[in-house]
Amino acid sequence: MRDAITDVPGIRVGNAQDSKTARGVTVILCENAKTAGVDVRGGSPGTRETDCLNPVNMVSAPHAIYFSGGSAFGLAGAGGVMKYFRDRGIGFDAWNIKVPIVPGAVIFDLTVGDPFAYPDEAMGYQACLNANLDVPMGNVGAGTGALIGWAGELRQRMKGGLGTASAISGDLIVGALVVVNCWGNVRDPKTGELLGGTTNLEGDGLLDAYEEMKKKQANYPSKEPKKGITTHTTIGVIATNAILSKPMATRVAMMAHDGFSRSIEPAHTAGEGDSIFAVTMGEVESDINIVGSMAADAMARAIAKAIRSADSAYGYMGHAELAERIARKAR
């Protein structure tokens, strides 16, 4: 097993990026999925086709999940994913016309790289062509321009990125993939180690994001411009080989948000678009509580792996560089 979302049979992941402009897309191909759901908890989401996944609506499952940078501009790249499936005759059958269903979400990364460069249909199509079972992590795909730690100034932020993990019990497999671009700090859910977030001004330690958030309250009684919580987003997807109804797939997406809360401090702020999708491949009988709990575990570990894998880039430190600076300070 790869400890990746592709441990779930029928799931492939493709990435495409332009490292020069710091933009990229990630596509999770799941054309044989049985059911799906989504749960949006952030207050500023950038999404497409999420209503299709509402349990009361007709479409049972998507053909792919699309993630990208570029804020709302990046949603255009999903058209390339649709073209990929159209060219292969795959899609929802509407009067003998195949219409691919591609829900997705974007992160705000326009403060990194070129603010006028956005993922397009060509990049979305290329990500599909690149899809396979191996999932690189860190500064790839939709995680190329991701940042974490927005409690301070721009120079105090750190590099975010893409991560994946899986949880297995017998024949049951639950995988997670996530693009970490959060306002808060990130902690390893297993060890408790603080991995990254808002650095101090010296760049050799981390501030407490929650405490920094509380300090902003002091601005509110004054007549000065209010310093609110800026726009950021962590987006993820759960895949499982469990047999679940569409409402229960939605429940899995809801339970997986516990993984955000275990690893990101704070999470689900009004300025973020935190969203989790869930797709089921429908092979193994299980209990929703088992699947949902494993989803939260896999998601929390995927978040930690994303930050551990993110290298320094675009003038922002990665986890390894920060760890070296902290160790050097201690010597």
Image (cartoon, rainbow, N blue to C red):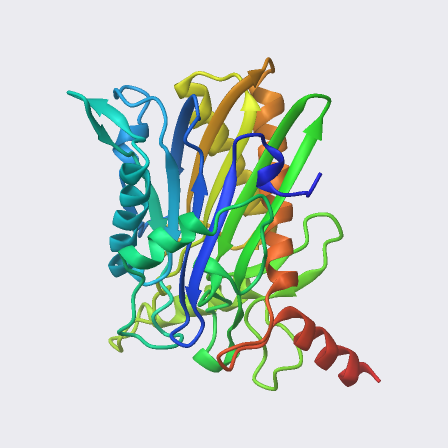
Residue at (40, 20) in percent of width and height: 246
Q: Nearer the viewer, residue 268 or 215?
A: 268
Residue 67 horizontal/vertical position (percent): 39, 50
Q: Can you see residue 235? A: yes
Answer with left or right where residue 100 lies relative to residue 207: left
Residue 130 horizontal/vertical position (percent): 47, 52
Residue 28 horizontal/vertical position (percent): 45, 42
Compared with 288, 19 (above or below) is below
Count of numbered tags: 0
Residue at (76, 52) in percent of width and height: 191
Compared with 166, 61 (above or below) is above
Residue 136 horizontal/vertical position (percent): 59, 56
Q: Can you see residue 181? A: no
Place residue 292 in its image quadrant: top right
Answer with left or right where residue 98 lies relative to residue 282: left
Residue at (68, 54) in percent of width and height: 188
Q: Nearer the viewer, residue 35 or 7?
A: 7
Q: Nearer the viewer, residue 168 or 157?
A: 168
Extreme residue toward the front, this view: 88
